[in-house]
Amino acid sequence: MQVGAGNAWRGLVHVALVAGLLTGCGEGAEDDAKAGASASASNPADAADAANTAPEGVESGGTIGAAGSPCELPVTFDIAVKWEAESAPGASKEVPEELADMVLRQGPVTAACEVDAKPAGHIGFLRIWTGEPGDADARAVLEEFLAAEKGVSEEKYTPFEAGDLSGTEVEYLYTSELMDETKTERALAVATPDGPVVLHLGGLDTAEHEAMLPAYELAKRTLRAS
């Protein structure tokens, strides 16, 4: 979907327009692969270090979700230092609503924001998806989210609490047909009065996913209703 850091969602819409690739979070594998190729070409040693180093903790680089932040959401949470947040074009009305819904929707939620890890030395994204208000609980939303994605297996669901929110988290395996490999991914969902919110963490491969986990855990730990 994405074409390089800083133009992620715009790249997704461009690809959809010219090639008709209509998929959800699993395409992050191809996006992460492109980012990985770029990072390796510019500095192979740095790319290798990023993939093999999993920091024990991470410093907060600020909070997103509130009005005036890079992404306005039904929730707020901290992002890791150097990670860069960007709104999806559909959320900022940069593309027609029909196209945004067709390309950026997965199950009951629509892409709203993407936080790029590349400036922090990792190859992957934390993606945020939002849905319409309703009665669906967090687990049901998460199950529908994964059901809309091909290549998912071995899902393990766990309840969690963060501040004033209760939600469900899932760890699973994603197999990319294009990349012909299997990797670990995670997602969590919470229900808010303004609708459900899903946070999804992918990565170039399982090593990168594990390296980015401290940033994901920071977001999960600081998650609050807006």
Image (cartoon, grey):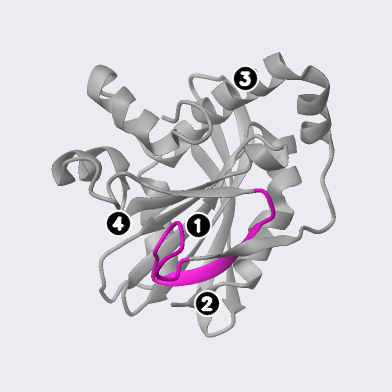
Looking at the picture, which amino acid does disc 1 mark?
A: Leu
Magenta range is: 65-82
Mark 4: few, some, or many residues within 10 Å (few <14, many ≥20)? many
Residue highlighted by disc 4: 108
Looking at the picture, which amino acid does disc 4 mark?
A: Pro
Residue highlighted by disc 3: 38
Nearer the camera: disc 3 or disc 4: 3
What is the distance, in whole Å, between disc 4 and disc 1 at their CAs? 13 Å
Magenta region's main secondary structure?
loop
Mark 3: few, some, or many residues within 10 Å (few <14, many ≥20)? some
Mark 2: few, some, or many residues within 10 Å (few <14, many ≥20)? many
Residue highlighted by disc 2: 224
The mark nearer the N terminus, 4 or 2, is 4
What is the distance, in whole Å, between disc 3 and disc 4 at their CAs? 33 Å
Label 4: which secondary element: loop
Looking at the picture, which amino acid does disc 3 mark?
A: Ser
Residue 137, by quadrant, is bottom left
- What quarter of the picture does the N terminus occupy? top left
The mark nearer the N terminus, 1 or 2, is 1
Looking at the picture, which amino acid does disc 2 mark?
A: Arg
Image coordinates of residue 99 in percent, x first then y, are: 19, 38
Whether residue 150 appears in this view of the structure is no
What is the distance, in whole Å, between disc 3 and disc 1 at their CAs? 25 Å
